[in-house]
C-alpha cells in the first residue's frame, strides 16, 4: 500500500515537473515570437533552430554571406542542439531527484540556452537594405531615443563604444527598462541573456561581438564591424517590440 | 623594482623566475629624451621562436601573423600607453600583471587585461614547436599517470576543459605546489598537500599564476586563435594542438623548474626524499614520524634538494 502510494506520488511529481518544464518552455517560445518547440517522445519539449527571413548573402557588404552561414548553421545550431541535450539531462536529473546533477547542469544550460535566446533575437534585428534594413527608427522609439540619448547619432556612438570596449566575448544591447520606462545601453558577457543584467530589461536590439560574428571579414577590427552593422539594422522590429512593451 | 605588497612578493618573484626561465621577458626602457616624440616602449612582446609559417599546416601563416603581429601587438601598444607615470612604471611584465590583478576581489585594474594577454601569448607561442606533438617522456608520463590516471585521461580532461570554457579564454596544464597561497597550514584535502599536475580553464586574460600555480602549457581558445583555420571547430583545433604542435620537452623543462620553486617556496619534500637525504648524510633518524622528518628536512638548505619523487 505504502509502495503504491509513493510510486503514485513520484509519478505526480514527475508529471508536475514535466508540465512546469513544458509550460516554461511555452512561455519562452512565445517570447521568441514563434520558434515553435517540437515535442519529443518523452514529452520534453525541445527547441528548433529558427530560419532566417533573408538569404545568407543578403546582408552584404555589411556582413558577409560566409559569416552568416557559419553563424547560423554552425554556431546557433550547436547552441540549440546542446541546449536540448542539456534540458533532457536536466529532466532526467529532476525526475531522479539528483540535486547535484541539476546544479552541475546550470552552466551548460545558461550558456547554450542563452546562446539560443540571444541569436534568435539577433537574426530579427537584421534586415537586408532592400527590405528596410538601416532605416532609422521613427515615431515612439525614435522620440524615446532622442529623449534618453540626445540624438540617434549619440546612441550609435555609445553602442559602438561599449561594444568595442567589451573584453572577451559578449553582446551589446539597446534595452528598454520597463520599470524605469527608459532606454539603456547594456552589455552582457559570453551568452548571458539581457535579463541577467536586470529582470525589467527588454531587448530591443542586440549586437553579437563574439569574434565569430565578424572575424572572417573584419579580423580584429571590431569597430569597423560595429559601424557597418547599422546599415542592416532592423529598426522596424525594434520599434514593434518597444511599442508592445510600452503599450 | 617597485615595492609590492608583502604577500605578493613571493609570487612576484616566482613570476619573475617563471618569465625569465621561459626565455627572458624583455623590458625595454627607451632613453627619456625630452625632445623625443612618440610612445615609450616599456614592455615588448617576445619574438616568435620560429618563422610564421613553421606551424603549418596546423596553424596557418596568416593566423600566426595576425595573432602575434596584430592581436598581441595591440595589447603591447595599449599597455605601454598606460604605464607612464602610473604605479606600474618600472615593473616587469609579470609584476605588473600580478599587481594589477587586484587579487580578483573586484575587477582588475586596467593594465591587467593587456599585461596578462601579452604574458599568456608569449607563453602560448613557446608551448608549441614545429613538428611537436608526439608523446611525453617516460618521466613525465609517470607524473601524468599519477595525477590523471592515464595519458588518455589527461587528454580527455583537456578536451572537456577546452569545450566548456564558455567564451574566450585559455586552457592550462600547470603544476600546483603543495601549499595554498597566502595560507600557512595544511589543507584537510589530501591532494592539496603534495605538488601535482592540474588542468584548468580561465576566462579572457586570467591565468593560473594568479592562483599561485606554475603553468606548464597554454592553449589559447579565444576564437581569433583558430577561426581562420578551423572556423567553429574548437575541438579539432585543440586536439591538433595536442597531437601535432605541443612541445613536451618545453613542458618537462618548465615542470623541473616549477618543482624546484615549489620546494623552495613550500618547504615541501616527500618522505622518500627525506629518507634518502638522511641516509646519504649517515644520520639515523629515519624512523621519525613523518611530521618530524619533514621539519628536519625543512631546516636544510634547499640548494641541496633535487626534485625527486615529488
Image (spheres, coloured by chain):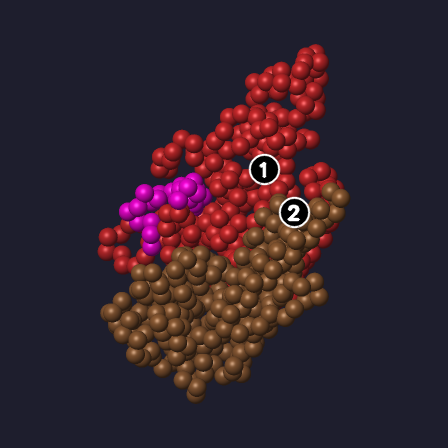
Chain colours: A brown, B red
Q: Chain for mark 2?
A: A
Specify few, some or many for label 1: CA neighbours under 10 Å numbering under 14, 14-19, or 20 or more: many
Answer above or below: position of B274 versus A65.
above
Task: Identify the residue at horizontal 34%, vertical 60% (top origin).
Answer: A179
A54 to the left or right of A45: left
Residue B100 lies in what quarter of the image?
top left
- Where in the figure is residue A231, as x and y percent of width and height? 39, 79
- Where in the figure is residue B238, as x and y percent of width and height? 63, 58
Specify few, some or many for label 2: CA neighbours under 10 Å numbering under 14, 14-19, or 20 or more: few
Task: Identify the residue at horizontal 59%, vertical 62% (top origin).
Answer: A22
Residue assigned mark 1: B176
Q: Nearer the viewer, residue A16 or A219?
A: A16
Residue assigned mark 2: A97
**Which residues fall within the magenta stretch?**
B81-106
Q: Chain for mark 1?
A: B
Answer above or below: position of A58 versus A81.
below
Q: Nearer the viewer, residue A119 or B177?
A: A119
Q: Quadrant of the N terminus of chain B?
A: top left
- Where in the figure is residue B281, as x and y percent of width and height? 67, 16
The numbered mark at residue A47 is none
User: Judging from the image, what secondary structure is the residue with disc 1 in?
Assistant: strand
Q: Quadrant of the C terminus of chain B?
A: top right
Task: Identify the residue at horizontal 53%, vertical 32% (top origin).
Answer: B180
Answer above or below: position of B15 versus A110.
above
Task: Identify the residue at horizontal 46%, vertical 67% (top origin).
Answer: A208
Q: Is residue B225 magenta?
A: no
B148 to the left or right of A213: right
Amino acid at each position: 500500500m505504502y509502495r503504491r502510494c509513493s510510486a503514485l506520488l513520484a509519478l505526480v511529481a514527475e508529471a508536475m515537473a514535466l508540465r512546469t518544464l513544458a509550460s516554461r518552455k511555452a512561455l519562452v517560445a512565445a517570447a521568441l515570437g514563434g520558434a515553435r518547440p517540437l515535442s519529443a517522445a518523452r514529452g520534453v519539449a525541445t527547441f528548433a533552430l529558427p530560419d532566417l527571413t533573408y538569404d545568407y548573402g543578403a546582408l552584404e557588404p555589411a556582413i558577409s554571406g560566409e559569416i552568416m552561414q557559419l553563424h547560423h548553421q554552425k554556431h546557433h545550431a550547436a547552441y540549440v542542439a546542446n541546449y536540448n541535450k542539456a534540458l533532457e539531462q536536466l529532466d532526467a536529473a529532476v525526475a531522479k531527484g539528483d540535486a547535484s546533477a541539476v546544479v552541475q547542469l546550470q552552466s551548460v544550460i545558461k550558456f547554450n540556452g542563452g546562446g539560443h535566446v540571444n541569436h534568435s533575437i539577433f537574426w530579427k534585428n537584421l534586415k537586408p537594405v532592400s527590405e528596410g534594413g538601416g532605416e532609422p527608427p521613427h515615431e515612439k522609439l525614435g522620440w524615446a531615443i532622442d529623449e534618453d540619448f540626445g540624438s540617434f547619432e549619440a546612441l550609435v556612438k555609445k553602442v559602438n563604444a561599449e561594444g568595442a570596449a567589451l573584453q572577451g566575448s559578449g553582446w551589446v544591447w539597446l534595452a528598454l527598462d520597463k520599470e524605469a520606462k527608459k532606454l539603456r545601453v547594456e552589455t552582457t558577457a559570453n551568452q548571458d541573456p539581457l535579463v541577467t543584467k536586470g529582470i525589467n530589461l527588454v531587448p530591443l536590439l542586440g549586437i553579437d561581438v563574439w569574434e565569430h560574428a565578424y572575424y572572417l571579414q573584419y579580423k580584429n577590427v571590431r569597430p569597423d564591424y560595429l559601424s557597418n552593422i547599422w546599415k542592416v539594422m532592423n529598426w522596424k522590429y525594434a520599434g514593434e517590440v518597444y511599442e508592445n512593451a510600452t503599450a | 623594482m617597485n615595492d609590492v605588497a608583502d604577500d605578493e612578493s613571493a609570487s612576484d618573484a616566482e613570476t619573475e623566475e617563471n618569465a625569465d626561465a621561459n626565455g627572458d621577458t624583455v623590458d625595454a626602457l627607451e632613453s627619456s629624451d625630452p625632445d623625443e616624440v612618440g610612445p615609450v616602449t616599456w614592455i615588448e612582446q617576445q619574438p616568435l621562436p620560429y618563422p610564421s609559417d613553421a606551424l603549418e599546416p596546423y596553424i596557418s601563416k596568416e593566423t600566426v601573423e595576425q595573432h602575434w603581429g596584430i592581436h598581441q601587438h595591440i595589447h603591447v601598444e595599449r599597455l605601454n600607453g598606460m604605464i607612464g607615470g602610473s604605479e606600474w612604471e618600472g615593473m616587469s611584465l609579470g609584476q605588473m600583471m600580478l599587481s594589477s590583478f587586484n587579487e580578483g576581489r573586484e575587477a582588475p585594474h586596467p593594465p591587467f587585461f593587456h599585461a596578462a594577454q601579452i604574458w599568456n601569448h608569449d607563453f602560448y607561442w613557446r608551448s608549441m614547436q614545429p613538428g611537436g606533438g608526439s608523446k611525453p617522456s617516460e618521466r613525465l608520463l609517470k607524473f601524468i599517470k599519477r595525477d590523471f590516471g592515464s595519458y588518455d585521461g589527461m587528454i580527455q580532461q583537456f578536451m572537456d576543459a577546452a569545450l566548456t570554457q564558455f567564451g574566450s579564454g585559455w586552457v592550462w596544464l600547470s603544476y600546483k605546489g603543495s601549499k595554498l597561497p597566502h595560507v600557512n597550514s595544511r589543507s584537510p584535502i589530501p591532494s592539496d598537500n603534495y605538488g601535482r599536475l592540474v588542468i584548468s580553464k580561465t576566462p579572457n586574460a586570467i591565468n593560473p599564476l594568479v592562483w599561485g600555480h606554475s603553468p606548464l602549457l597554454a592553449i589559447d581558445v579565444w576564437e581569433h586563435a583558430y577561426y581562420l583555420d578551423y572556423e567553429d571547430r574548437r575541438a579539432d583545433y585543440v586536439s591538433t594542438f595536442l597531437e601535432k604542435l605541443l612541445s613536451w620537452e618545453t613542458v618537462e623543462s618548465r615542470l623541473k623548474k616549477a618543482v624546484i620553486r615549489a620546494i623552495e617556496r613550500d618547504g615541501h619534500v616527500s618522505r622518500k626524499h627525506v629518507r634518502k637525504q638522511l641516509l646519504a648524510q649517515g644520520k639515523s633518524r629515519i624512523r621519525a614520524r613523518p611530521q618530524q622528518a619533514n621539519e628536519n628536512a625543512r631546516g636544510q638548505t634547499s640548494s641541496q634538494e633535487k626534485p625527486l619523487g615529488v
